Image (tube, rainbow, N blue to C red):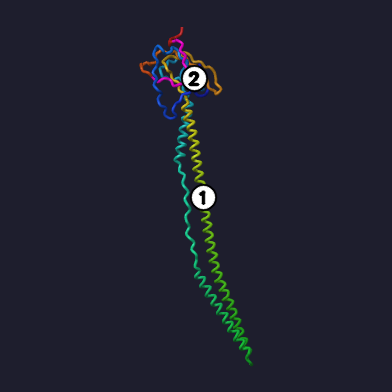
Amino acid sequence: MRHIISGAVATVLTLTIPALTPSPPEQITQPETDTAPSRLTISVAVADPDDLKVSVGDRLSVGDLIADRTRERQRLEAQQQQLVLALERLQTATISTPLPPATPPAVLEPTYLEEEAAIARAAATVEQAQQAIALKDRELSYLRALDNLNPLILEHEQVKRQELEQQLEAKLRDYQLALGQRSTREYQHSIVSAETVSAQNRDALDYQQQWLTYEQRLRDRDYQVSQSQLRLDDVNNAIANLAVVRSPYAGRIRQVQWLGQNPDGSLDVELTLLVRDGSGENSTGTTLPGIEPGLSSHPNGESDRPES
């Protein structure tokens, strides 16, 4: 009865199998009848009894499968397909180059023509008011020098002078207002210029940060591609190292002996194949593919016939 222990299959000598599309094994011509052994001992290391494809009493033709790490192969091939798809996604992924910031329109230098005209008009009215006051002061000085002048006349002229002073104060306020409007326009222009420069600096910093992020994403993708490729290479190597054991002769499995368990968890099993009449041909008389490297044979003169 076969023992049930989980694991994978491996031959004593490692067999190299291509990773994706294994090429057919080399056709091996069997030795002549007079050199073929009557008994062949095949040593195989298995980790799962299901990977041993033969049992006692099975009759084999040349090239029939004896042992294969089926579960491990399926697991590795599924992992291989996932890694291939992941590599394709990484290699076809688009990482957009950052767009440079748009150039803002230039801030035009104002001419201040209206403000300058308003200032000039206000200054002219101030000057006119000052001249009118100066003229009134001379007139008052003349009247004060007259004898027998009616006091009401002098008082009336003094009232007029006060009105002129009030008009001058109004004209001065208009002049200050015109100057203030000019200063306000200059300040507004300086604010717009400063905001434009600040926006350009922010855009430049954002563009620089976008480039840093873009370059980091490229490095991350290259790293992921290299890591995925390394894992894929490891999986391909693991698939290639999965040995497939095939029968080099036609015959019958006489004995299956479990020898023990290795430190890595695999089991050593020894098969005894009784070679049928010592020939290497199958029922059709054609030569079939032989066993890949990984078998040891010990001829001892027995043939494929029931033991007494």
Give the main secondary structure, helix, strand or loop, of the magenta stretch.
loop
Q: Residues within 10 Å of mark 1 (few under 14, many from 20)?
A: some
| Amino acid type, residue under disc 2 in the picture | Val
| Amino acid type, residue under disc 1 in the picture | Gln
- Image disc number at residue 208: 1
Q: Residues within 10 Å of mark 2 (few under 14, many from 20)?
A: many
298 is within the stretch colored magenta: yes
- Measured as percent of width and height from the top left, residue 196 is found at 51, 58
39 is within the stretch colored magenta: no
Marks 1/2: CA–CA distance: 62 Å
Left or right of 87 in this view: 287? left
Q: Are marks 1 and 2 in contact (CB under 8 Å)?
A: no
Left or right of 277 in this view: 196? right
Chain part drawn in magenta = 288-302
Whether 152 is drawn above or below 228: the answer is below
Residue 301: quarter of image: top left
Whether 132 is drawn above or below 222: the answer is below
SS assignment at label 2: strand
- Measured as percent of width and height from the top left, residue 132 is found at 57, 82
Q: Nearer the viewer, residue 109 or 283?
A: 109
Looking at the rendered image, the disc whose residue lies closer to the viewer, 1 or 2, is 1
**Residue position marked by numbered label 2 in the rendering:** 44
Whether 148 is drawn above or below 123: the answer is below
Q: Looking at the image, which residue is at 54% across and 66% down?
A: 186
SS assignment at label 1: helix
- Measured as percent of width and height from the top left, residue 201 is found at 53, 55
Q: Residue furthest bottom?
A: 148
- Measured as percent of width and height from the top left, residue 125 is found at 54, 77
Left or right of 161 in this view: 242? left
Whichever of callouts 1 and 2 sits on the residue coming sooner in the sequence is 2
Q: Looking at the image, which residue is at 45% across and 21% down?
A: 293
Q: Looking at the image, which residue is at 59% across and 76% down?
A: 169
